[in-house]
Image (cartoon, rainbow, N blue to C red):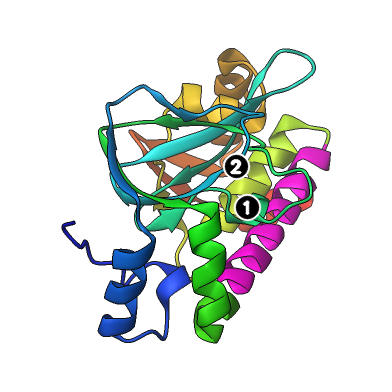
Amino acid sequence: MAVYDVTSCPLFFHLSPDERETILERAVSEVRRVEKGHYVVRQGDPVQHLFLLMEGLVRTEMVTKEGNVLEIEFIEPVRPLAPAFLVAAESRYPVDVITMEETLFYVIPKSAWLREMMLNETLMTNFMRVNSNMTVFLSKKVQMMSIKSLKGKLSLYILECTAPQSPSFTLKRTQSQLAEYFGVQRPSLARTLGELIREGTIRLYKRELTVLDRRKLEEMV
């Protein structure tokens, strides 16, 4: 098996190169390539493997009760897919995972990963930290969704992507993808962006968004 660099993966922080290589050689049962636009897993599928995204880009999404597609996040290498659900009582994927470009995964059987964690305290600690950080991320997502107005949700998103010293960032999502992230229709998002621009709160050139009045954004949150 060709061994890819997992140094940037938080599951393998503070492990020596030999430790990382040994773990992967023992645990990885398959190297899987998935073409662009395909489902890796579907919401509700049982979690029987740990998928490590080594190359490419995926997005996670779920369908709300109203029938809207709600994007949860984009995942870039090197990251695991839904690691917390590997050990959950209800061990099923909470989201659909869809490839945005051709991707490559290391596939590790659940039993093999659990065995490796029992053998390596650092690996187990990293696994727990990754899951804790995901809890923080989901808490912020819930906070955003609890804001009733789309303008408030968009303001919070922009505030989290910028800082007073760094008021600009590049939107990685298209407007359609951003609408799905907020669980709304694209025209609603376009209208709200237009309002923020006309009010002088932000400037948007292509995908470069700049905050012009941070105080106004904070007030809308």
Q: Secondary structure at mark 2?
A: loop
Name the main secondary structure of what is drawn in magenta.
helix
Q: Position of residue 29 (x, y in %)?
A: 35, 51
Q: Is residue 164 visible?
A: no
Q: Position of residue 206 (x, y in %)?
A: 33, 33
Residue 138 in magenta stretch = yes
**Circle 1 sits on which residue?**
86
Residue range corresponding to the magenta coloring: 127-147
Q: How many marks?
A: 2
Mark 1 or mark 2: name the one nearer the start of the chain: 2
| Residue kind at label 2, given as amino acid type | Val
| Mark 1 and mark 2: Cα distance apart in space | 6 Å
Give the numbered dot on residue 47: 2
Residue 203 in magenta stretch = no
Q: Residues within 10 Å of mark 1 (few under 14, many from 20)?
A: many
Q: Is residue 113 visible?
A: yes
Residue 24, picture quadrant: bottom left
Q: Tell whether label 2 touches label 1 (CB within 8 Å).
A: yes
